């Protein structure tokens, strides 16, 4: 996928820096990246974590795959090059939120290891990969959006897990097993991780 490159641009330094924003908010900016198959529970768990953090006085924002494709990335389809660009754009948006001191919870299938590796390059130590591990048959059994059924019927091309690959993370910071844990149990694991690693 060809992307035009900007020219004649210069980075302008801000008068208020990240550490000042984080001090004002009383928290550290961070990106929690939830990856997993469609129907694995990424968005549901991310929103449960965000709700708990919000109720404890933390500023959060959830970036959800479907929501982003309604606006910022509505020009992108689902070919592998377009998925790569989708993830790159989200990484850059998340970096801005993190720089603002916000705890970002991103729920994206993000099927390829190389794309998630790019996120680590963009975010550095502010990137926390959360693998929502759920067997394909369980995700397909849930099928809340009836996407698997459409993919099996040939109505959706390049659908992750059916006609397009999903590469499980090799070394995520945290793995959740949403087929064996409740949403609350998974959310508690994320919160415990954040507390244990002094992220809050």
Image (spheres, rainbow, N blue to C red):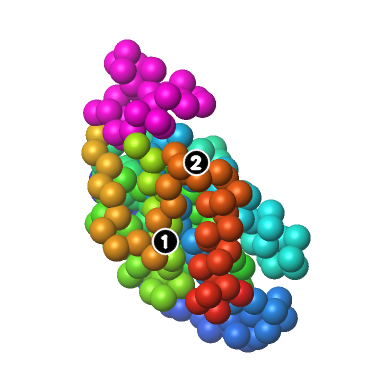
| Quadrant of the drawing holding the N terminus | top left
Could you say where residue 14 lies in the image, as x and y percent from the top left? 58, 82
Could you say where residue 95 lies in the image, as x and y percent from the top left? 48, 67
Numbered disc 2: secondary structure = loop
Residue 26 left/right relative to 106: right
Please give the name of the residue rendered at 39% of the width and 18% of the height, measured from the top-left corner: 149
Where 151 sits versus 103, above or below? above
Q: Which mark is residue 41?
A: 2
Please give the name of the residue rendered at 74% of the width and 66% of the height, measured from the top-left corner: 56
| Quadrant of the drawing holding the C terminus | bottom right
Whether pointer 2 and pointer 1 mark residues with C-beta atoms closer than 8 Å, the reply is no
Numbered disc total: 2
Please give the name of the residue rendered at 75% of the width and 60% of the height, measured from the top-left corner: 55
Q: Is 140 colored magenta in this rendering? A: yes
Could you say where residue 22 lies in the image, as x and y percent from the top left? 64, 80
Q: Badge 1, how many Cα within 10 Å: few under 14, some, many 20+?
A: some
Q: Is 176 colored magenta in this rendering? A: no
Disc 2 to disc 1, C-alpha distance? 15 Å
Please give the name of the residue rendered at 41% of the width and 61% of the height, measured from the top-left corner: 174
Find residue 54 and report its image quarter: bottom right
Residue 56 left/right relative to 122: right
Could you say where residue 30 lies in the image, as x and y percent from the top left? 53, 69
The residue most toward the front is 180
Q: N-terminal of the two: label 2 or label 1?
A: 2
- Mark 1 lies on residue: 174
The residue range painted magenta reads: 136-163
Residue 97 left/right relative to 110: right
**Residue 141 can be seen in this image:** yes
Residue 44 left/right relative to 140: right
Q: Badge 2, how many Cα within 10 Å: few under 14, some, many 20+?
A: many
Numbered disc 1: secondary structure = strand
**Residue 90 can be seen in this image:** no
């Amino acid at each position: 996928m060809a992307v035009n490159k900007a020219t004649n641009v210069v980075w302008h330094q801000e008068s208020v820096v990240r550490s000042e924003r984080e001090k004002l908010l009383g928290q550290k900016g961070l990106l929690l990246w939830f990856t997993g198959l469609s129907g694995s529970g990424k968005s549901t768990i991310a929103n449960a974590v965000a709700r708990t953090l919000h109720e404890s006085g933390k500023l959060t924002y959830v970036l959800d795959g479907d929501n982003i494709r309604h606006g910022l990335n509505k020009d992108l389809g689902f070919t592998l090059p377009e998925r790569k660009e989708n993830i790159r754009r989200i990484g850059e948006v998340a970096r801005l939120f993190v720089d603002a001191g916000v705890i970002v919870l991103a729920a994206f299938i993000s099927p390829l290891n190389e794309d998630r590796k790019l996120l680590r390059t963009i975010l550095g130590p502010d990137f926390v990969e959360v693998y929502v591990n759920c067997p394909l048959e369980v995700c397909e059994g849930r099928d809340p959006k009836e996407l698997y059924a459409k993919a099996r019927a040939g109505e959706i091309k390049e659908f992750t897990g059916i006609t397009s690959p999903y590469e499980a993370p090799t070394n995520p910071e945290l793995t959740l097993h949403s087929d064996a844990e409740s949403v609350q149990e998974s959310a508690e694991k994320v919160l415990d991780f954040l507390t244990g690693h002094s992220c809050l």
